[in-house]
Image: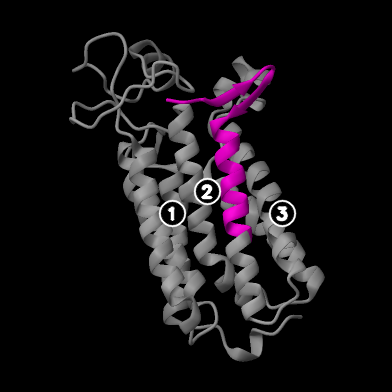
């Protein structure tokens, strides 16, 4: 855990904020290159990334607060202004809304722009997961695996008291009281997301059917998140088996699969 990368007098550079900046500029750099290659105004890249960042942060935070409403009631100020809680699926919805506003203002085809940003969505997610790991947030359930990691100062700490208070649905009966070691799901997701990014990035110049790259992204990102949720700490809502994130992931997979099998007609691809 490295919540603070370095300090210079009163100035502190926090690792999570730093990784958000890295994600922002990495996506901006790659998007700008593709925007130029496709003949669009390069200013479009900065508009899209800015809208995605603002919408993504707001959407993810709102999703997190709704998902943890009981903790918000107990400590509203601490939950709203904490560094934790940037939930990807909420960020995807908020970021999509922000980018949609930009695309409509520019009178561009939404689905064609979605293909352009699809690889960068998962890249930004991967980099963000490194930030979560450095601050000890969004970890998994306790485990005895040899690569398990403890976050004694995490957000929140991985202690038996925290799990009993915040995650009572997680069974910790087989573990000694005190600091617990957990699945480093942030690193699992980072690895999977980098692989998905590489797969999509290689295919971005060979899109034969508009929207196919974006819908493929929905499927792969949905499968990744659905799988990882089984070892995350999120509460099970559906049949006491599936989490809210898994339900949304299934919706992503269904939408992606449907439109891959039933491409959008060319007559509907042009901007309104």
Residue matched to label 3: 50
State the residue at coordinates (68%, 42%): 58
Characterize the local packing of mark 3: few (<14), some (14-19) or many (20 or more) Cα atoms within 10 angstroms: some
Q: Magenta residues? A: 1-28
Distance (Cα) linking label 1 and label 2: 8 Å
118 to 87, vertically: above or below: below
Residue matched to label 2: 89
Helix or strand or loop: what does disc 2 sit on?
A: helix
**Rendering coords of residue 48 (x, y %):** 70, 61
Q: Earlier in the sequence, mark 1 or mark 2?
A: 2
Distance (Cα) linking label 3 and label 2: 18 Å
Q: Farthest bottom residue?
A: 267
The figure's colour scheme reads one colour
Q: Earlier in the sequence, mark 3 or mark 1?
A: 3
**Rendering coords of residue 3 (x, y %):** 51, 25
Characterize the local packing of mark 1: few (<14), some (14-19) or many (20 or more) Cα atoms within 10 angstroms: many
Q: Farthest front residue?
A: 8
**Rendering coords of residue 194 (x, y %):** 40, 56
Q: Earlier in the sequence, mark 3 or mark 2?
A: 3
Q: Is residue 238 visible?
A: no
State the residue at coordinates (48%, 67%): 255
Which of 189 and 236 lies nearest the eye of the viewer?
189
On-image quarter of the N terminus: top left
Helix or strand or loop: what does disc 3 sit on?
A: helix
Q: Are marks 1 and 2 in contact (CB under 8 Å)?
A: yes
Q: Quadrant of residue 270?
A: bottom right
Q: Which mark is residue 249?
A: 1
Helix or strand or loop: what does disc 1 sit on?
A: helix
């Amino acid at each position: 855990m490295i919540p603070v990368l370095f300090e210079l007098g009163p100035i502190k550079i926090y690792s999570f904020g730093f990784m958000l900046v890295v994600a922002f500029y990495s996506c901006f750099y790659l998007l700008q290159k593709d925007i130029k290659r496709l003949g669009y105004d390069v200013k479009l890249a900065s508009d899209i990334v800015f809208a995605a960042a603002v919408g993504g942060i707001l959407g993810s935070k709102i999703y997190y607060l709704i998902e943890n409403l009981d903790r918000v009631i107990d400590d509203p100020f601490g939950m709203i202004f904490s560094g934790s809680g940037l939930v990807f699926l909420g960020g995807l919805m908020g970021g999509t809304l922000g980018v949609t506003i930009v695309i409509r203002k520019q009178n561009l085809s939404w689905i064609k722009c979605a293909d352009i940003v699809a690889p960068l969505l998962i890249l930004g997610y991967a980099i963000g997961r490194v930030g979560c790991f450095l601050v000890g947030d969004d970890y998994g359930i306790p485990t005895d695996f040899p690569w398990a990691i403890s976050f004694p100062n995490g957000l929140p700490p991985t202690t038996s008291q925290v799990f009993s208070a915040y995650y009572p649905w997680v069974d910790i009966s087989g573990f000694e009281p005190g600091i617990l070691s957990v699945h480093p799901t942030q690193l699992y997701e980072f690895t999977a997301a980098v692989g998905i990014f590489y797969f999509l990035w290689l295919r971005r110049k060979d899109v034969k059917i508009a929207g196919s790259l974006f819908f493929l992204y929905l499927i792969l990102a949905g499968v990744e998140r659905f799988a990882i949720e089984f070892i995350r700490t999120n509460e099970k809502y559906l049949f006491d088996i599936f989490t809210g994130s898994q339900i949304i992931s299934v919706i992503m997979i269904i939408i992606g699969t449907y439109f891959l099998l039933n491409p959008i007609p060319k007559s509907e691809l042009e901007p309104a």
